[in-house]
Image: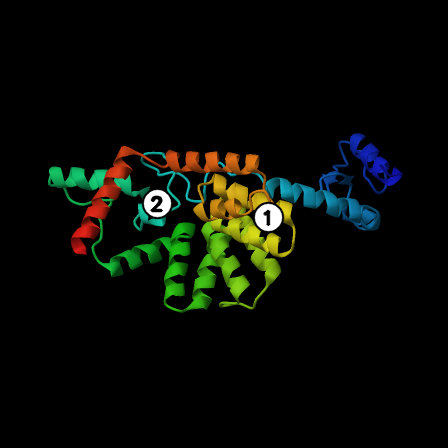
């Protein structure tokens, strides 16, 4: 290790300013370098004066800290758990639905069980979570979404963005997603990354596309993770690409698992693929329940009757 790095560590251990060497006391409070957290400074002036000496080490450590966060396996996907049965929501969006009255994503198993109970007992149809009467018209759904979006509900703003995108109004869609992303919505980050990648509603910007994809991936979005993996493959950063695909497959993402299978003994070992396969199946099994299976059977029967 260089003498410069040794000096940085010594200053940090003694809680001294890395630039002027002044020690912390009751009157002088030192603050960490916000990027790397390796050194401390007594003020902005010292930080600026020390920047030329610290820049390389700071950039390297900041990248390491970023990767620690980026490549950490999320506990669940960005969908999270159903707030009623507390089981993980499926990545298949057809197996859950958002209630516009409360912006909760409810699995179809809980929706089905609630609907069957209401039919048996001749009850009014209500939201299975907040018990608000269900609306039957699309315009009522839109009004609920708008009302919640105006109250800064990130889920409602995200869904309003999707509506505006489907209508072809990319500018308004981007505006809704930007607000939702600022409030931490991973799906909004993903949609923004796609807009920056494709140049829809905004100018193409690869750096911004990657930034928002990374924020979505950190939040457990498997498609964002998959996109990052293929961006890394395109740039020949194979190890990083495989890490992204493994994390996505562990969340139950079928496309990432298939991609890993295509790269067995090329870029990914048989052991790593086997581990990803087991984690993928565990994620699928965790999202199963008798109620959800009954709801899926009911849906298939209705579809076959219509056909």
Residue position for label 1:
241
Q: Mark 2 to mark 1: distance in Å?
A: 31 Å
Q: Position of residue 116 (x, y in %)?
A: 17, 39
- Tell me where residue 121 sits by quadrant: top left
Q: Viewer-nearest of labels 2 and 1? A: 1
**Residue drawn where x is 33% and y is 36% of the image:** 288
Q: Nearer the viewer, residue 286 or 69?
A: 286
Residue 36's place in the image compared with 150, above or below, is above
Q: Position of residue 118 (x, y in %)?
A: 16, 40
Q: Are marks 2 and 1 in contact (CB under 8 Å)?
A: no
Task: List the single residue furthest toward the right.
Answer: 3
Q: Nearer the viewer, residue 254 or 49?
A: 254
Asked which secondary structure carries label 1, the reply is: helix
Residue position for label 2:
105
Q: Nearer the viewer, residue 15 or 103?
A: 103
Q: Nearer the viewer, residue 215 or 21?
A: 215
**Residue drawn where x is 18% and y is 45% of the image:** 125
Q: Position of residue 198 (x, y in %)?
A: 52, 65
């Amino acid at each position: 290790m260089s003498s410069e790095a040794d000096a940085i560590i010594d200053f940090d251990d003694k809680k001294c300013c890395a630039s002027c060497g002044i020690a912390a006391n009751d009157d002088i409070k030192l603050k960490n370098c916000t990027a790397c957290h390796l050194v401390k400074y007594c003020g902005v002036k010292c930080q600026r004066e020390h920047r030329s000496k610290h820049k390389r080490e700071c950039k390297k450590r900041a990248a390491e800290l970023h990767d620690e966060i980026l490549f950490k396996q999320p506990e669940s996907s960005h969908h999270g758990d159903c707030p009623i049965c507390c089981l993980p929501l499926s990545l298949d969006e057809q197996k859950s639905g958002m209630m516009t009255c409360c912006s909760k994503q409810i699995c179809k198993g809980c929706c089905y069980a609630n609907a069957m109970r209401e039919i048996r007992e001749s009850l009014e149809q209500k939201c299975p979570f907040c018990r608000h009467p269900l609306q039957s018209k699309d315009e009522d759904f839109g009004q609920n979404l708008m009302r919640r979006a105006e109250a800064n509900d990130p889920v409602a703003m995200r869904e309003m963005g999707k509506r505006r995108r489907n209508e072809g109004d990319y500018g308004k869609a981007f505006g809704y997603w930007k607000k939702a992303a600022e409030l931490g919505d991973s799906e909004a980050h993903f949609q923004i990354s796609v807009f920056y990648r494709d140049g829809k509603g905004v100018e193409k910007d690869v750096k911004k596309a990657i930034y928002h994809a990374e924020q979505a991936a950190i939040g457990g979005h498997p498609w964002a993770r998959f996109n990052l993996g293929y961006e890394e493959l395109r740039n020949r950063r194979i190890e990083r690409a495989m890490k992204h695909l493994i994390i996505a497959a562990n969340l139950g993402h079928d496309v990432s698992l298939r991609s890993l299978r295509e790269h067995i003994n090329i870029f990914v070992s048989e052991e790593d693929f086997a581990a990803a396969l087991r984690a993928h199946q565990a994620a699928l099994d965790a999202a199963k329940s008798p109620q959800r299976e009954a709801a899926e059977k009911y849906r298939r029967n209705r579809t076959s009757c219509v056909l």
